[in-house]
Amino acid sequence: MSHKELGEPVASLGFPRHTLVSLLIFAAAWEVLSNLAPFLGIPPFAVPSLVRIAKAIGTITPLDVVVTLARVIAALIVSFIAGLALAMAMYRSDPLDKYLSPIIRVFVAVPVVSWILFAVLWFPGVEFRIGFVLVVVCGPVFLIDTLDAMRSVPRELRHMMRSFRPTTLQFFIKLMMPAIIPTIFTSWKVNISLAIRVVTIAELVGAVTGIGAQLSNAQQLFSVADVFAWTIVLVALLFLLEAIVSRVEHRLLRWRA
């Protein structure tokens, strides 16, 4: 078995060896900085030690983690379904593509903070606000990536498929979906990272549960250790979700290996 093959399971989990080494080096450097903080004129609370951060992690409530994770997963599923369906419709209809494309580009250009403010002004429910922000931010990414992947399918293959006179559903299932699956997985990885960042900001406004709400509480208490603890949890969630997507991608796309 080659070294490449031995490394694939580790990489598919999302934790390659060099990543672990980098994290350990960063942790060691942070601990040194924490010990040197008093001599450098830095307040001790500003650079908490790893022990204080570990204690803060031990006080984390699982409910807030589960709530944030549920919000992210639900919004990503809705965004993917909506983006895929709209991409298929725009691919089949030139007028729809012509008139919707500028609107989609505008949606992409609007800052996340603006969407959050719109959600606060438009909707009374906190959960709907957070879901709205996540969908309007992640949905266009799925749509654009999927539509571009469909357009990149060779014209010869499309003409050959149409020669068999398939239905619209057969055309997409038999030809388009297998061709765009690699792009879909890439889009999922990008959107997972985006959703993790966006949900935290959205939870800062009005939410009483979730990691973003707990970060807001930690900021009000000037607890840097708690901020680090919740941030580490967010990064861990990102790694976990990306590892799951990578594992599914590895299994479905073994033919590329």
Image (tube, grey):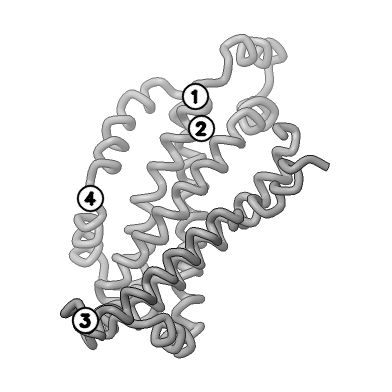
Residue underneath mark 2: 88
The amino acid beneath tag 4 is Pro
Please say if 231 is above or below 182.
below
4 or 2: tag closer to the N-terminus: 2
Q: Position of residue 205 (x, y in %)?
A: 25, 72
User: Which residue is painted at 47% across and 26% down in the image?
Assistant: 91
Q: Residue furthest front?
A: 39
Residues under numbered marks 2 and 1 in contact, where contact means CB atoms less than 8 Å apart = yes
Q: What is the C-alpha distance between the residues marked 3 and 1? A: 66 Å
The amino acid beneath tag 3 is Phe
Please say if 129 is above or below 32.
above
Nearest the camera: 204 or 10? 10
Badge 1: few (under 14), some or many (20 or more) residues near its Cα, within 10 Å? few
Residue underneath mark 1: 92
Residue underneath mark 4: 111
Q: Position of residue 230 (x, y in %)?
A: 40, 76
3 or 2: tag closer to the N-terminus: 3
Q: Position of residue 187 (x, y in %)?
A: 49, 42
- The kind of secondary structure element at disc 1 is helix
3 or 1: tag closer to the N-terminus: 3
User: Which residue is painted at 39% across and 76% down in the image?
Assistant: 31
The amino acid beneath tag 1 is Arg
Q: Residue furthest right?
A: 1
Quadrant containing the C terminus is top right
Give me the disc on residue 200: none
Q: Position of residue 4 (x, y in %)?
A: 71, 41
Which of discs 3 and 2 lies nearer the camera? The answer is 3
Nearest the camera: 114 or 34? 34
Badge 4: few (under 14), some or many (20 or more) residues near its Cα, within 10 Å? few
Which of discs 4 and 2 lies nearer the camera? The answer is 4
Badge 3: few (under 14), some or many (20 or more) residues near its Cα, within 10 Å? few
